[in-house]
Amino acid sequence: MGRLQVAVVAPSLGILGGQAVQADRLLRAWSNDPDVHAWLVPVNPLPPRPLGFATKVKYLRTVVTELTYIPQLVREVARADVVHVFSASYTSFLLAPLPAILIARALGRPVVLNYRSGEGPDHLKRSAVARRALARVDRNVVESRFLADVFASFGIDATTIPNIVDLERFRFRPREPLRPKLVSTRNFEPLYNVACTLRAFRLVQDRWPDATLTLVGGGSETDALRELAARLAVKHVTFAGRVSPDAIAAHYAANDIYSQSPNIDNMPTSVLKAYACGLPVVSTEAGGVPAMLRHGEQGFLAPLNDHQALAAHVLALLDDPALACRITRAASHACEACTWAAVRQDWLRTYQSVIARPAPERVAARSND
C-alpha cells in the first residue's frame, strides 16, 4: 500500500477555536510523513471574489459558504483514500460534517468522524439525524472517555484518541514563587461562563489586591463581561481579545494559575496547555473535565457556576505553593499521552482499519470512478 491520501474536513484557522487548532496541529504533524499525505478541506472556504460581499450578510453568508463548500468537497473527497471529518454539534453538524459524510458515502470513501463537542449529550438526545449518521460512518473517534461513554449510551461505538499538545511551544516552567497572576483562554460564549471566573477573581482580589486576571478570547458576551468587571470593581483585568494559536503560548507563560468555569465542556486543550506550561488548573467540573483532571491530584474542581468554590481553590494554591508545585508536576505527566509521538500510531491504525475491508457500497463507487 502506498502513502495514504487523507482529506481532513475541518475549520481553517480563519475560525479561531479548538477544532481549527487541532486540525492545523494534525496537518502539521502529518506533513512530510512517509505513511500519510493529509490536506485540509475547509468547512469555511472563501467564496469566489464576485460573491465576497456576501460574507458580511449573516444568512446570505451561510448560503454562499455552502455553495462554495459542497463542490469543493466533491473534488477533494474524490481524490482521498480516507475522509477525516471534524465535527461539532447542532446546526454546525448539519452544515459541515453531514454533507461530508453523505458525499464520501456517495463516492465510496471511508469516513473517520472525529466528534469533538461537549454538547454531545444533548445533541445526540435531540437529533435522530446525528445518531443515524454517526452509527453509519466507518469509525467514530472522540478525544475523551466522557464522549466515548456518551456515544455508548446511544449504542454507538467510538475510539478514544486524545488531543495533541505541542510541548515545544508550551514548555514547562515551575512557578516558584507562585504569583497571583491568573489567566483564562475560553471564548466569551454562554457555555464557557467566563462571568463565573470574573466573580471568583473578585474574591481572590479581596485577599490579594495586586492579583491580575488575563482573559484571552472573544465572543457574544464581550460587552456583558466588560460591564460585569466594571460592576465588580475588579482591578488589573486585561481583556486580551482573540489571539492566534501561535501567540497564545505567551499568555500561558506570562501567568501562574489557569482558571476556567465552563458549564459545558469536553476535553479542553486549554487545560492540557496549562498542564504543559506548569500552571495549576482550577476548573468547574463540566462534561469531560473530571475525566482528565483528578481533583486534588492534577488540579482542583468546583461545582458548576460556583464562583466561591472556584476562588477558594485559587486561594488554597496561593496559600500553599508546595501544593501547587506537586499538582503541576503530576499534571505535566498527563501531557505525555497527548504528544504526536503518542497518538500518531493510533491515527495511522484508524485510517488503515477503515480501508482494510471496504464496504460493498464503497467498492461499487470506486469501480465507477
Image (tube, helix red, strand yellow):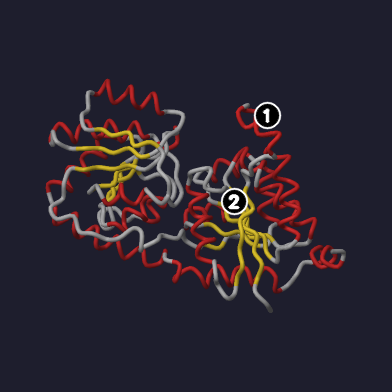
Residue 164, position in %: x, y? 45, 60
Whether residue 83 is situated above or below residue 52 in the rendered picture:
below
The residue located at (21%, 37%) in the rendering is 212
Which residue in the structure is indicated by mark 2? 10
Q: Amino acid at mark 2?
A: Ala
Whichever of callouts 2 and 1 sits on the residue coming sooner in the sequence is 2
Q: Amino acid at mark 1?
A: Leu
> Which quadrant holds the C terminus?
bottom right
Whether residue 154 is situated above or below residue 230 in the rendered picture:
below
Q: Nearer the viewer, residue 169 or 314?
A: 169
Whether residue 156 is visible here, answered yes or no, is: no
Left or right side of 365 for 45: left
Q: How many residues crowd mark 1 within 10 Å: few (<14), some (14–19), many (20+)?
A: few
**Image disc number at residue 60:** 1
Q: Nearer the viewer, residue 174 or 304?
A: 174
Q: Nearer the viewer, residue 54 or 35?
A: 54
The residue located at (53%, 70%) in the rendering is 346
Whether residue 332 is visible here, answered yes or no, is: yes
Left or right side of 221 for 24: right
Left or right side of 288 for 113: right
Extreme residue toward the right, this view? 368
Left or right side of 203 for 225: right
